[in-house]
Amino acid sequence: MSKFTEKYIASFMSELEAKNPGEKEFHQAVREVLESVAPCLEAYPHLLDNKIMERIVEPERVIIFRVPWMDDEGEIHINRGFRVQMNSAIGPYKGGIRFHASVNLSIMKFLAFEQTFKNALTTLPMGGAKGGSDFSPRGRSDAEVMRFCQSFMTELQRHIGPDTDVPAGDIGVGGREIGYMFGQYKRLRDEWTGTLTGKGQNWGGSLLRPEATGYGACYFAQAMLATRGETFEGKTVVISGAGNVAQYAAQKAMRLGAKVVTMSDSDGYIYDADGFTEEKIDYIMWLKNAKRGRIREYAQKYPQTQYFAGERPWGVKCDIAMPCATQNEIDADDARKLVEGGCFCVTEGANMPTTPEAIAIFQSHKLLYSPGKASNAGGVATSGLEMTQNSIRQKWTAEEVDRYLHRIMSDIHDACIKYGTEEDGYINYVKGANVAGFLKVAGAMVDQGLV
Ligand code: NDP
């Protein structure tokens, strides 16, 4: 790194931290991108002159609003709603909605910032956004979740639309929540458009959207493995999370010949040394999506399984790790355990699940390591395909959508190779994804003038 780049990063970050105090996840996400792209800024001085980096970290708009709702006992609750509309240079704002007690402005901004580059990588015309609330659907009845979603959408509908901003799901927001929000949006706006994605199959949803993030992560991992002449066949895979992304990552990895041995939730993880089967994955989907139960119940159903309360699965020996739960779930100790256990490929299904210290360990050991903004982009890409199908009032077959998904993941992989291959041949996927996404968004911003 040149002296200029080092100085630029230090002064940029100190200003950003002073201007956005306490937003540690946002600082972390910006620093990671900045470290990758700062050398480009030296090579393309017009990006510096246009203050692209200063503009790209400032959301175009942040909406924070009150979400009042009543529980089944008649008690009133007040939650906080967010929508961060980060960047619309290459298309309408697009990004998920997260309902989780931990949601705050820092988490919303880091996710919207990451989303901007991820969406650019998909090759589709989508800007970056993220939204959500500190409401947790866990333990709430369907009626309570519906009242909350309706109250949330009553305010959000003013700020979104098919050509303005198209939200989707994320942690705590699946088909049920999208349904309630879509119903309320349609009622208030008196229009039927593809304003939310992740919709049900009978009312505008795209085939393969539920599967897309997990499947896409596996397609990306396949491309990474192929650079070393490897495949999923016979490999042991450790997965965290038990939600949408984890379920379909596990299903696809297993169908590609791997033995998947773990899943987790925020209470602990299960270790099934025999590996999951189709039947076991179907059970997990029923347990998590229909019964809304906890992952420990798997160990009651399949007694040969071990359950580790309060722990994460990274100490389990594996070839491939797929973190699919939440941000910062692999720290330096976890990374060391994975490397010592023989893991040689880490593919992120979640957003920013690996801390900077852990990334440094993976890269210094020359692991195949892909950041979420590259390997989990299949979800938003298929949301983009859902928007296209809604606009042309058609529904494509699963095979057609899968073909697009394959092509998009392979294009993202090519972009990472183009911008991330280092002198010794090691592919730095973090650098590749950041530079490719940044150059596309930055170019569009320059073309569109000072807005
Ligand atoms: P879900 O709500 O379906 O599942 C989330 C899973 O992660 C649950 O098992 C949950 O456990 C676990 N989890 C959540 N928070 C924590 C925590 N703090 N510690 C440990 N475990 C936790 O969400 P998704 O599967 O949709 O999302 C998972 C990740 O993938 C997120 O980072 C999301 O941003 C990212 N992502 C999702 C996309 C999508 O299409 N859905 C697209 C791209 C990225 P519990 O039930 O105990 O909360």
Image (cartoon, rainbow, N blue to C red):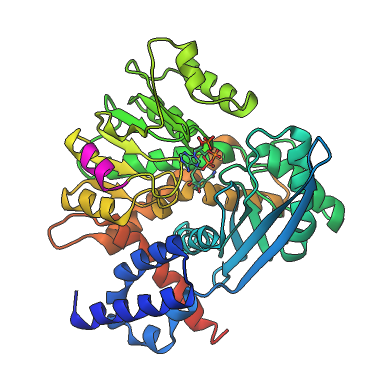
Using the image as rendered, state which of residue 360 and residue 56 is in the foreground: 360
Characterize the magenta stretch by its predominant secondary structure. Answer: helix
Left or right: 246 in relation to 238:
right
Inspect this view and state whether residue 411 appears: no
Give, as a single range, the part of the protein colored magenta: 331-337
Q: Which residue is drawn at the image coordinates 21% and 46% (left, top)? A: 367
Q: Which quadrant does the C terminus fall into?
A: bottom right
Residue 281: percent from the left, percent from the top? Answer: 49, 22
Residue 289: percent from the left, percent from the top? Answer: 61, 29
Q: Which quadrant does the N terminus fall into?
A: bottom left
Is 298 magenta? The answer is no
| Residue farthest left in this picture | 424
Using the image as rendered, state which of residue 358 and residue 247 is in the foreground: 358
Left or right: 50 in relation to 233:
right
Inspect this view and state whether residue 112 appears: yes
Residue 220: percent from the left, percent from the top? Answer: 37, 44
Q: In this view, does 364 lie above or below 307?
A: below
| Residue farthest bottom in this picture | 49
Left or right: 304 in relation to 118:
left
Q: Which residue is drawn at the image coordinates 41% and 42% (left, top)? A: 217
Q: In which quarter of the image is residue 83?
A: bottom right
Q: Which residue is drawn at the image coordinates 52% and 46% (left, top)? A: 379
